[in-house]
Image (tube, coloured by chain):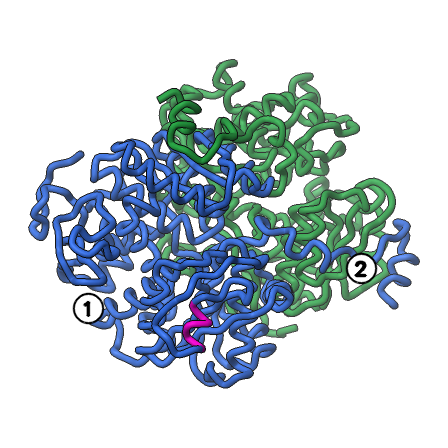
Chain colours: A green, B blue
Amino acid sequence: MTLTAQPTSTTGLDLGPAAALACRACGHRLDLAAEFACPQCFGPLEIAYDFGRVTREDIERGPRSIWRYKSLLPVPSTVESYPNTDPGLTRLLRADRLGAELGIRNLWIKDDTGNPTHSFKDRVVAVALAAARELGFTVLACPSTGNLANATAAAAARAGWDSVVLIPASLERAKILMTAVYDTNLLACEGTYDDVNRLATELAFEQEDWAFVNVNVRPYYAEGSKTLGYEVAEQLGWRIPAQTVIPIASGSQLTKVDKAYGELISLGLVDDAEYKVFGAQAAGCSPVSTAYREGTDVVRPQKPDTIARSLAIGNPADGPYVLDAVRRCGGSINDVTDEEVRDGIRLLARTEGVFAETAGGVTVANAKKMVESGDLDPDADTVLLITGDGLKTLDAIEHQVGPKATIPATSAAVREALGL
Amino acid sequence: MTLTAQPTSTTGLDLGPAAALACRACGHRLDLAAEFACPQCFGPLEIAYDFGRVTREDIERGPRSIWRYKSLLPVPSTVESYPNTDPGLTRLLRADRLGAELGIRNLWIKDDTGNPTHSFKDRVVAVALAAARELGFTVLACPSTGNLANATAAAAARAGWDSVVLIPASLERAKILMTAVYDTNLLACEGTYDDVNRLATELAFEQEDWAFVNVNVRPYYAEGSKTLGYEVAEQLGWRIPAQTVIPIASGSQLTKVDKAYGELISLGLVDDAEYKVFGAQAAGCSPVSTAYREGTDVVRPQKPDTIARSLAIGNPADGPYVLDAVRRCGGSINDVTDEEVRDGIRLLARTEGVFAETAGGVTVANAKKMVESGDLDPDADTVLLITGDGLKTLDAIEHQVGPKATIPATSAAVREALGL
């Protein structure tokens, strides 16, 4: 652990512009540390910052990864000098063909399948690893059902850290193999994901050198999602899109993209213009969209039943904050059926050549629904976040797509098959 | 088709710095067109250039994709204004942990799994699409067993072109699904890949608006691999690594990276320093390494039998040119067993957090072998090309990796399983 003091920190830690932990429920502040629950009210903690002067030019001169935004993240000022997965700066694609199908005139896709393990989880894990190193941890860990397991095991491998990944024993083959290949301590646990998650919290208290990225270093980890918002704005030429559609699992991603937009405005990095964020869920796991529709602040837990397994969090920790953000800016939250999710995956693939996992299908299908309902303004600049890769959820389309025909290898057979 | 004349072209086509087609066998030159075989000797045609002044600054100011090198590629000067997959500028990773295992002091990984469909094939297909548009084609096509099928179908979808993809009917599920999802005309053909390839050549003559990327527009397509060489040099701070290890399928990639290095030197974009390129094959398909070992110029065809299916070309078109390039610069060509390929995949994953397909395992395992044999200088700067993604070849590691244990979801069980 480096002991270089930062002007804004009282702890001797170098965590960049991070100044303190602050409770999102009661506002209580405490020193930066590996804490995740408020000692006064048990509310969730998040990072409070003391930003210095940040310019577009400084960012643009930075590395081609999320570390170009290090002056806005809770990571050491020397973050690039340690091995990490260095994700980010994924493509922002102008999506005219999808836009034509959806009836949106100016549409972009943020394609996070280009990250090192092909999901946005590389962003949050990279920030968690950088903060965990500074906080004195030596083992990277997580409970997960897929993308997070891949990202955690890969980041630990690259850094030369030991890692522990806990998964439900019933997990699919591709996700198990793509985690185990990094030589992590992969433990298949009997029970549901909820059981695994509970076990992780217990272990986080017992094993003091284990950083469970989404448990005891969660306040740092979650900030990694802000980089999606920063990148969208920078890639649009330093402006915030009028409308952003974001999938909801725990809800953290939506609240952090909203936070990122707010920071860019308050730091003067973009013009202060109104924007809306929209939440996308699957009908089979729709606790936040249900609360939104019912006009309540209370997110009632659900038992998930959807093919969008990376979004299947029945009791989303950030649900109430998602409702706040969406209502504040005048967005909305919707949900779609599994059939619509499959159609969304296929629509995105055939119009833009981007093969998304089920979560991407959720985003596209909700965008379609929200144009039809009038929630989305078809004339306003719109960005859809595509946060994971179709190769990890092949089952979802298995019975939907395939060869047009099986034929003898002759040109006559090709002509006949294609009606030429 | 645009009719903007370029100063170097006699055809009315805008294909950037491309000046003519030249036969690699007899040197005969002809106008730029959709030709791939020399009308005089049936030798393979490649692009001859008339480069203008190209500076590092112009390139660095360009887009974050292969189009930053458009002044070195056979593509229209307006290439970025048409929808394409815009691949490239993938990570060049400093690989100290892998280097320590291999005994190479200064090692880098070029990680092409970050491309849109997760292999280097996006580079060649993007160039083929751009050239095909200018040449007047309207349909993108290919015969393929995997990565090329994914890349072709995705690029056509993004461009709004019809596409035809021919595969052997026996292809694996993941590769079929990741092609079919883009809504291409996917035809499963009875027979081997050789049968499918023959069919593609026949169709290329029959269907005049079909651009088979690796058949009738192959001279343009193949140039896309040069961008791997350009990027490695730029990302190293504009210098060519002393040693580059490159997998061999048709052999085109190795010859084009070598060509790229030569162009950078002759254009004064890098210092003129000696470099060596090394070829990597699997023992089960090693026609080029066999010829190299035997000291002959004749590459005798083999019947492939290896898990490295993306490299399994038994009669590689560019084999003789690979031998020329490697012998000219003092490199070497080797091959490794399937068991070593699997070990190579796992070694790369556990040291650097990069999950490569079997071709990447071939590269890593050959590098290991070549350090041990003395072919590779452990003190010279070395780059390994990792050209495809492990998620597409899960079968290769299926029986090699998995959970350390299956346990009850209790902390006692975790401690016992990990010996804590």
* Front-lying residue, B103 or B167: B167
Q: Say what amino acid the circle numbered 1 marks.
A: Leu
Label 2: few (<14), some or many (≥20) within 10 Å? some
How many marks overall? 2
Q: Which mark is residue B381?
A: none
Q: Residue at x 49, y 14 (%)?
A: A372
Name the residue furthest right. B412
Q: Residue at x 74, y 27 (%)?
A: A305
Q: Quadrant of the N terminus of chain B?
A: top left
Residue underneath mark 2 = B404
Q: Quadrant of the C terminus of chain B?
A: bottom right
Q: Is residue A374 above or below residue B4?
A: above
Residue underneath mark 1 = B267
Label 1: few (<14), some or many (≥20) within 10 Å? some
Say left or right for A16 vs B406: left
Which chain is home to disc 1?
A: B
